[in-house]
Amino acid sequence: MEVLLVLAVAAAAFVGFNVGGSSTGVAWGPSVGAGVTKKTTAAALMTVFALLGGWTVGRNVVETLGSGVVAPSAFTVEASIVVLVFIGLGMVVANAYGVPVSTSMTAVGAIAGLGLATGTLDWAVLGEIVVWWLVAPVAGFWCGGVVGRYLYVHLQRVVEVEQSDGPMVTLDWSSFIPRPALGPGTSLREFVSTALVVVVACYMSFSAGASNVANAVAPLVGGGLLAPGPAVVLAAAAIGVGAFTIARRTMASVGSELTDLPLLAAMVVTVVAATITTAASWLGIPISLALSTVMTIVGLGWGRASRTATAADLARGDVEGGVSVSAVAVEAGDGVAEIGEARADDLQDAAALFDPSTVARFVSFWILGPSAATVLSYLAFFVLPVAGTP
């Protein structure tokens, strides 16, 4: 029994480790790539705020996955190990194909398969979760679209993150008590904007902890193998290990790959996606942070490109060109063009951000991922009598 418990804890740590590797890159890649934070600092902040998110809001998701989707009695030690293995394999496969992984959706699928095999699946809870899976990407797209169409050009005139030479903050020793002061080349606008970047990344880390901690430890909590408090600490620690190790590469790759997507756009996407995910987590709904993030990016790009058209043009589907990286990156300049007056060549001159084939690939994996996890989990528990009975 002790050996199986150790294996279950190791499986949970493995899932948390991979969550830390992927989520840290998404949350901190833009700020690391812009030179705002160091990788070690980003990993430390990711660990702290993931623990905070898991300890507070994330407990609701742990309860849903551990006792809401299926009866807790189904989670024996062996069943917990099998479920966690399916979650880990889902992450490995999605990463291999370069698709933003949805750990939450894979976890729900694996647990639903357990419930189907044991006759303990709560269809009402599962239905509520699936409804949120449909609502979240739509909400992300339209929030991004509204910001891109109406607010983005104005935000560009306010937020500016350009690293000046020398330290950003210095200590003034002219008095007995040293006082912090802006560096020689640092403007107040630069300082506030840089601080905002760090705050937004911390918010994303909180959201990642709130939504993903449950994916690693919910089976252990549901089966009574670990109490919620120690389980959250275990998951956060594993996320931290992933943040300090494999996430160093993902932070570098995300930071460099997002060079065409300005830091301001990354901040907007982060705030929208993290807010949707945190709200769902507060309600106890396991939801995909990656799904909301990708669809917010698509909506933001579409909203920027749609500035070339009036509302009447949009209603007729008459929008010039497509959605491009430069549709997000276009500078505000000295003035802001009115809706319908922006020129198409101001918004498009780079590779397309909205590639229908890429979006189709993402969506297909978001459908196939949890579906495959459900079927494989069901078959595994149907063949192996390791799950508990009601």
Image (spheres, grey):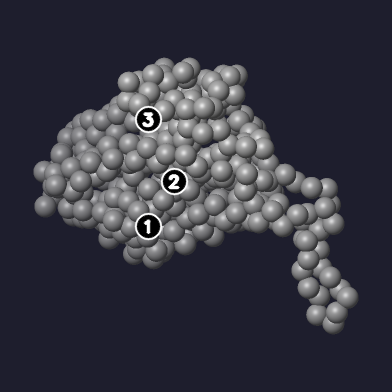
Q: Amino acid at mark 2?
A: Val
Q: Disc 1 or disc 3, which is closer to the eye?
A: 3
Q: Amino acid at mark 3?
A: Ala
Q: Disc 3 or disc 2, which is closer to the eye?
A: 3
Pointer 3 or 2: first along the chain: 2
Q: Residues within 10 Å of mark 3 (few under 14, many from 20)?
A: some
Task: Say which residue label 3 marks.
Answer: 311
Question: Which of the pair 185/385 is nearer the observer?
Answer: 185
Task: Say which residue label 1 marks.
Answer: 58
Proximity of marks 1 and 3: CB atoms separated by less than 8 Å: no
Q: Residue at x 35, y 53 (%)?
A: 279
Task: Say which residue label 2 marks.
Answer: 272
Q: Residue at x 23, y 40 (%)?
A: 130
Pointer 1 or 3: first along the chain: 1
Q: Residues within 10 Å of mark 2 (few under 14, many from 20)?
A: many
Q: Residue at x 47, y 39 (%)?
A: 150
Question: Which of the pair 171/210 is nearer the observer?
Answer: 171
Q: Is residue 179 left or right of residue 32?
A: right
What kind of element bears circle 2? helix
**Is residue 110 visible in the rendered structure shown here?**
no
Query: Quadrant location of residue 234?
Result: bottom left
* In the image, residue 44 above or below residue 148: below
Q: How many marks?
A: 3
Q: Is residue 282 left or right of residue 184?
A: left
Q: Amino acid at mark 1?
A: Gly
**Is residue 119 visible in the rendered structure shown here?**
yes
